[in-house]
Amino acid sequence: MSGDALAGREVLLVVGGGIAAFKSALVARELQRRGASVETVLTPAGQRFITGVTFAGITGRAARVDLWDPTYPGELHIALTGRADLVLVAPATADLLARMAHGLGDDLATTCLLAAHGPVVVAPAMHPRMWEHPATKANVALLRARGVVVVGPVVGPLASGESGIGRMVEPGEIVDAAARALTPQDLAGCRVVVSAGGTHEAIDPVRFVGNRSSGRMGYAIAMRARDRGAEVVLVSGPSALPTPEGVSVERVRSARDMRDAVMAAAGSAHLVVMAAAVADYRPSEVAAEKIKKSDGELVIRMVKNPDILAELGASRHEGGPMLVGFALETGDLVERAREKLARKGCDLVVANLAADGFDGDDNRVTLVTPGAVTPLAPMSKASVADHILDHFAAHRAR
């Protein structure tokens, strides 16, 4: 299932009336960047904030505004929704949400929403008092109960000069939500535990032994598992990455902290992916105060950390979770991955060279199982994540 769920899809973008409408142009551009074709419908109020010319320039298609368009001989709302894989409303005003909830259809936008046959995603934007109004709350609850995906709003500065909940989420997040809505839910009912990032082993109150792991690979696996319908627990070492929406995140610092969190979560898991770069050693003692510089050498005695992957493999019972490990090597990639596979009791080892995967969005890996070695071409970490999850889905289906 590797690849962007938006690639080759038709998206109908409905633009409501609000100052956030200017961001809808960025939504259209991001949809196209990810491979979707975009058709745009503006509400009458939406046309007061942004013109159809903007969207025509971005999408290469004339923006539609009139249910009674004299240039189109047929039923325009049926034609537009008939070829749309997804309808995306951004911004969705309080008025537009109310019209959707109550099935009104007196303009092109609302008739399209009534005729939509695929997923519908809305990104609300309005003043906090309008968002908090009981009528809006009831309308949103009704739409959610019907399967409409509601993304946002968030707290932030508003056009009024105030700050509060009601700000439309950023275009990238809206497009991510659209991609999730188009992703087959083949992992629904599965519980997935993923570890990510490095660990910090304290030397004194301010210094630690660590590594260069960014956590990007583990976070990508967690987010793709979420997108495919799994319940996901992400055990994250120190990382600058934002917390993924829709994922249960437990943040830890040391290898021992990570061991405790992973073992606690793994008991009810169907899949455990140890993507974290866990420190093999830690200082035997942690200084109570900052170590001062001196003329002599500083010698730190190190002791072994718990081997989380080996403990998971040894404690796994019949019918227990599938276990995936990672092997970051500087040479003899396949042979060392095979050795790790056998020694740790894994079902799959994802092996890569140290030069190929640090801190970037792409990776080049080799998948090693007891019966096969599968080198993958360089690809995004999200695509690598899908290959790993595809392996799990096939394993589960057997």
Image (spheres, rainbow, N blue to C red):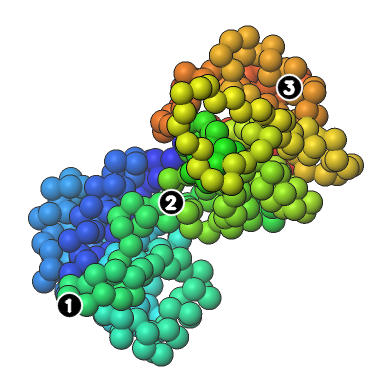
76 sits to left or right of 357? left
Residue 242: assigned label: 2
SS type, badge 1: loop
Q: Residue at x 31, y 48 (%)?
A: 31
Q: Amino acid at mark 3?
A: Lys
Q: Is residue 368 visible?
A: yes
Query: 377 and 288: which one is in front?
Result: 288
- Looking at numbered disc 2 in the image, what kind of residue is underneath it? Pro
Which circle marks residue 286 in the picture? none
Residue 252, image x, y percentages = 59, 49
Picture quarter with the C terminus: top right
Residue type beneath disc 1: Ser
Question: What is the quadrant of residue 167 in the picture?
Answer: bottom left
* Alpha carbon separation for disc pair 3 and 2: 31 Å
Instruction: Estimate the spatial distance between the alpha carbons at disc 1 and disc 3, rounded to whole Å.
Output: 59 Å
Q: Is residue 303 above or below residue 69?
A: above
- Where in the figure is residue 159, as x and y percent of width and height? 17, 72
- First in sequence: mark 2 vs mark 1: 1
Residue pointed to by mark 1:
160
- Location of the N terminus (image quadrant): top right
Q: What separation in Å lies between label 2 and label 1 (alpha carbons)?
A: 28 Å
Mark 3 — residue?
A: 340
Image-based side of 63 in relation to 101, left or right: left
Residue plotted at (73% across, 22% down):
340
Identify the element where label 3 is drawn.
helix
Q: Relative to residue 214, is residue 91 depicted above or below?
A: below
x%, y% of residue 34? 34, 41
**Label 2 neighbourhood size at 10 Å, few (<14), some (14-19), many (20+)?**
few
Q: Is residue 396 left or right of residue 72?
A: right
